[in-house]
Image (cartoon, grey):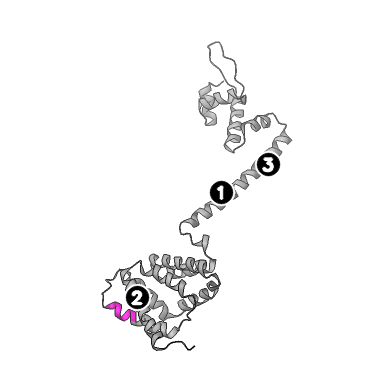
Amino acid sequence: MLTIGQLAATAGVTVRTVRHYHHVGLLPEPDRDASGYRRYTAQAAVDLIRIRTLADAGVPLSRIDALLHAQPPEFAAAITDIDADLQRKIDQLTEYRSRIAELDSGERLVLPPEVVAILNRMRALGIGEQRVLLERDSWILLQALDPDAVPHRIREKNAEFDDPETTRLYLAVDRSADWDPHDPRLDQLIDDLDAWEIAHAQDTGGQTTRKLISSRISESSPSWQRIVDALTHRAEQRRTRCPNPD
């Protein structure tokens, strides 16, 4: 025979929990013995373990009472239903965990997989996370302001990273983030970038979007601000010298 403390210990619950189960009618409360103590049988321990297990699985106490008095076939069918419900909850929680993990970067929540792949490609090339996150923001802006341009830009971006010279320039710009804006090394980098832009003569479409993207990048680093300003000035000078025909 077990005391209430011993009974609680066999099921891994507190004495207060046992008394609560007495109160709601789940576990019969034995009479007191001659010494004034309540003594519990081994069956009470088995019943308490069953109650605790079902309660831990999320089964309402009102349903537990019915299950404890069910015939074996009925009990087995109910357990099957409970197991299926637990599996649904596990699947839902697994999905929530996956979505929460994606919140860390926010990339997969708002960008196409092809763009996320480009961002990961930049990381693999050794481009710093600051520049990668700016690239991410640029894609978010592009998707919001000019979504039709996204597929074409994805193809362009992948082609750029297939080109060793373009990759070299990306890495060079990335390293320049912490340079003083008057660092003479920026002069050569600006020349290289300007030559690249001339060689790759981009179309004039999406100018508003590109201005926003350039602004987002340049505000992150004084040296990048100087690069963007210099390249913008040179591009304007070329347009002035060679205006588009009417």
Q: Main secondary structure of the magenta part?
A: helix
Residue type at the position of mark 3 = Asp
Front-most of 203 and 24? 203
Going from N to C along the chain, the mark reached first, 2 or 1, is 1
Task: Give the CA distance from mark 2 to mark 1.
Answer: 49 Å
Q: Is residue 127 visible?
A: no
Front-most of 53 and 229? 229
Q: Which mark is residue 93?
A: 1
Q: Secondary structure at mark 1?
A: helix
Q: Secondary structure at mark 3?
A: helix
Quadrant, the N terminus: top right
At horizontal 60% and vertical 31% (from top left) the residue drawn is: 51
Q: Secondary structure at mark 2?
A: helix
**Which residues lie in the magenta part?**
184-190
At horizontal 34% and vertical 75% (from top left) the residue drawn is: 229
Q: Which mark is residue 229?
A: 2
Which image quadrant for residue 122? bottom left
